[in-house]
Amino acid sequence: MKKIVSGTDMKKADAETINRIGIPSLVLMERAAECVAERIVEKEPKKKTVLVTASTGNNGADGLAAGRILHLAGFDVLLYIVGNPQKGSQEFQTQLHICRQLNIPETEAFENRDIVIDALFGVGLSRDVEGTYAEVIRRINEARNTVYAVDIPSGVDADTGKIRKTAVRADETVTFGVHKIGTVLYPGAEYCGQVTVADIGFPPMVYEGLPEIYHVEEKDLRNIPKRPNYSNKGTFGKVLIIAGSRDIFGAAYLCAKAAFRCGAGLVRILTVQENREALLKLLPEAMVNVYDEEHYDEKILDAALSWCNVVAVGPGLGVGAVQKRILERVLEAKLPTVIDADGLNNISLEEPLKRRLHKDVIITPHLGEMGRLMQTETAAIREHLLEYAEKAAETFGCVCILKDARTVVAENGACFINLTGNHGMATAGSGDVLTGILAGLAGVGTKWEDTAALGPYIHGLAGDIAAEKRGKTGMMAGDIIDALQDIFQ
C-alpha cells in the first residue's frame, strides 16, 4: 500500500522534513527539478523548445530549477515569470539568480513553444484562479504543445481534485513524494495526464499521523494466500451467490464466473427456478439451487448458508418481500457477506435491515445506490466521495466500497482510492464481476480487510488488460472476467 495525502497535509510533511528532519528546502527542490527534467529528457528530443511558466513561489522555483537543468542539457529554454519577481520567495530568488547567471533568457509575454513546464501553483492553492493567472492557463491550454505540470496542474485543488475555476490540462504531471488527493480524484485526475510519482527524499516518518488514505500497488497481490499443492476443491472456499430474478440470469452468471476465476473452489448459485436451465448451460461448473418466489421455502436458503463460507447477494435479485426475507436471513447468519445492487436497494427500503449490517459485510454501492442508502443527493456524494464512504462505513458498521470512476474503500478508519480501471468498464455487468471477485478472494482465504482493498484493484487491472487487448469502446463484462486469468498467472 502507498500513501495518498491532501495538499494541506503534504505542506505539513514538507515543513516537517525541512524544519525537524533538517533537509534543506533547496536540496528537496533540486531533486524535484531533476525529476521533472529527467522525464522531459527521457521523452523529448533536445531540438524542442521549452517555456517555463513560473509564479514567484516555491512551485515556480521548482520550475526555474528544472528549466536550468534542461538548459544545461542542451534544450532551448525560455522563462516566463508571472508576478513580481522582487516579491518572490527566498528559494525563488535563489533559483532566478542562478538562471540569470547562466544567461537563460526571460520573456515578458507568453510565447508558444514545443514544451511548456507548468510551475504556476503547487499543492497549496486554496483560492479560485482569476486575472493574469487564468489568462496564462488559457494560453497554455489553447497552445499546441506538450505540457508537464510540476507537482500538480495549476488550478487543481490538491485537497479535493476540484477545479478552481480553470486549470492547466497537462500531458504529464510529476508529483513529489506521494500521490495527492487532487491527482487521483476526478475531475483533477483528468487534468493530470500521466502521473509520475517522484521520490525526492521525503522520509517516511513525515507521513506518520496523517489521515490513513492509501492506494493498492501490484506487490499487494501477495496478500492473496498461496495455493498449496496438497489441496482439493474444498480447500479454496465455498462461495454462495444469491442473485438473479425472472428473466435476469446474467448477473448471477457473471458474478459466479468471476468468483471461479479468482480461485474459488466451489460456487453455488441460489436463484429463482426460472433461471436454472440457462445457468446450468452457461456455467456447468457451478451448482445451481432454486426457489419458488411465489411459494418461498426458507429451508433451501438455510441449507445453502450452512454449506458456504462466504456469501454474495444482490446482483439482479429484484426488490420485494421475498428478497427482504432473504437478506434478513443472510445477515442473521453473520457470514462474510458481499452485498451489491438489489441487495442494497432492498436494504435502503428497510431500516431494520440497515441495523443488521455488521463488520463482516462489504457493501458495494454505486452513486445512485449510495444516495438511496444514505438518503442523500447523488451530486453531493459525487463531490465528497471519501467523506461519504467513511460515513457509510461508520454508520452501518461495515466495509463500504463506493464505486465511481475512482472507487473508494472505507474500512476500520482507513480509506483506499483505487487507481486502476478505465472508462471501458462502464458497461452492464461490470459491478456483478466486482462482486464475484470479492467473494472469490474471500473464499480462498484472503483476509477480509485485504479483500476489500484488493477487489477493486484487481477488477480495474483486469479492465486495463482487457482494454489493451480489445480496446475500451465495446468492452463487455465478460472481457473483464477473461482478463482475470492474466492477473492470477
Image (tube, rainbow, N blue to C red):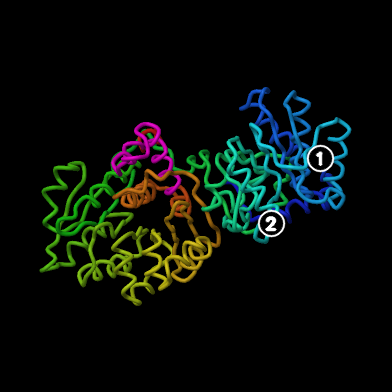
Q: What crowding class fits label 2: few (fewer than 14 Cα within 10 Å), some (14-19), or many (20 or more)? A: few
Q: Which residue is mark 2?
A: 131
Q: Nearer the viewer, residue 90 or 181?
A: 90
Outermost residue on the front side: it is: 109
Where is residue 300 drawn, in percent x and y?
Answer: 17, 62
**For the stretch drawn in magenta, what is the main secondary structure?**
helix
What segment is highlighted magenta in the picture?
455-483
Residue at x-position 48% and y-position 56% = 409
Where is residue 78 drawn, in percent x and y?
Answer: 75, 34
Q: In the rendered view, does 158 fall on the left or right side of 292?
A: right
Q: In the rendered view, does 296 fall on the left or right side of 119?
A: left
Where is residue 432 drawn, in percent x and y?
Answer: 31, 51
Q: Nearer the viewer, mark 2 or mark 1?
A: 2
Where is residue 463 drawn, in percent x and y?
Answer: 39, 41
Outermost residue on the bottom side: it is: 351
Residue 360, above or below 229: below
Q: What crowding class fits label 1: few (fewer than 14 Cα within 10 Å), some (14-19), or many (20 or more)? A: few
Residue at x-position 31% and y-position 39% = 479
- Sequence-wise, which precedes: disc 2 or disc 1? 1
As measured in the structure, the alpha-carbon distance from the residue carrying label 2 to the one carrying label 1 is 33 Å
**286 part of magenta stretch:** no
Q: Nearer the viewer, residue 224 or 473?
A: 473
Residue 430, above or below 365: above
Q: Which residue is mark 1?
A: 27
Q: Nearer the viewer, residue 210 or 106?
A: 106
